[in-house]
Amino acid sequence: MEVEPTLANCPNFRRHLSKTCWSFEDDGPGVAPDQQLTLGTAYARFDPSRDRQTGGAGLGLAIVCGLAEAIGGSVSFRSKPGRGLHVQVVLLSAGRSSE
C-alpha cells in the first residue's frame, strides 16, 4: 500500500507547482558552524559517542543528498549549536526539469 504524502499525514510536506519540499527538524545539540560544510558528505559523524558499533557509518545524509541531486533536487541544512538541525529536501515535480 502506497501512501501519498499530504498536509494531513505529513505536516512538513509542501507541494508547489514545480517542486515538492520536505522539511525535517530534530532537537539535538545542533551542528557547529565549522562542521556544517561537511553535512551530507560520506562518513561525516559529529557525535564522538557514536561510531560504527553504536550508531551507523555516517552515510544517511550523504545518501539523501546523492539521491536528491541525481534526480535534479537539492538538500539544504540549517543548524545552530544547541538548537538542533533543520533539513530541507526539494525535489522537482514530475514532468519538470532543472534545466
Image: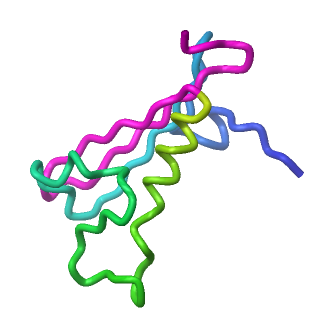
Q: Position of residue 64 (x, y in %)?
A: 51, 48
The residue sitting at 19% across, 56% down in the picture is 31
Vertical position of residue 53 compared to residue 40: above or below: below
Residue at the spot x=40%, y=87% of the render?
54
Q: Is 32 situated left or right of 98 in this image?
A: left
| x and y percentages locating residue 86 in the rendered image | 33, 45
| In the depicted structure, whether residue 89 falls above or below residue 56 | above
Question: In the rendered view, how is the structure colored?
Answer: rainbow
Instruction: Pick the residue in front: 1 or 97.
Output: 97
The residue drawn where x is 31% and y is 63% is: 44
- In the displayed structure, does residue 90 sit left or right of residue 71? left
Which residue: 51% across, 53% down?
A: 63
- Quarter of the picture containing the C terminus is top right
Residue 25 at x, y = what percent?
A: 37, 49
| Res 95 quadrant in image | top right
Q: What is the residue that sits farthest to the bottom in this orientation?
A: 53
Tally the numbered discs.
0
In front here: 52 or 33? 52
3 within the magenta span:
no
Q: Is residue 59 above or below residue 33?
A: below
What segment is highlighted magenta in the picture? 72-99
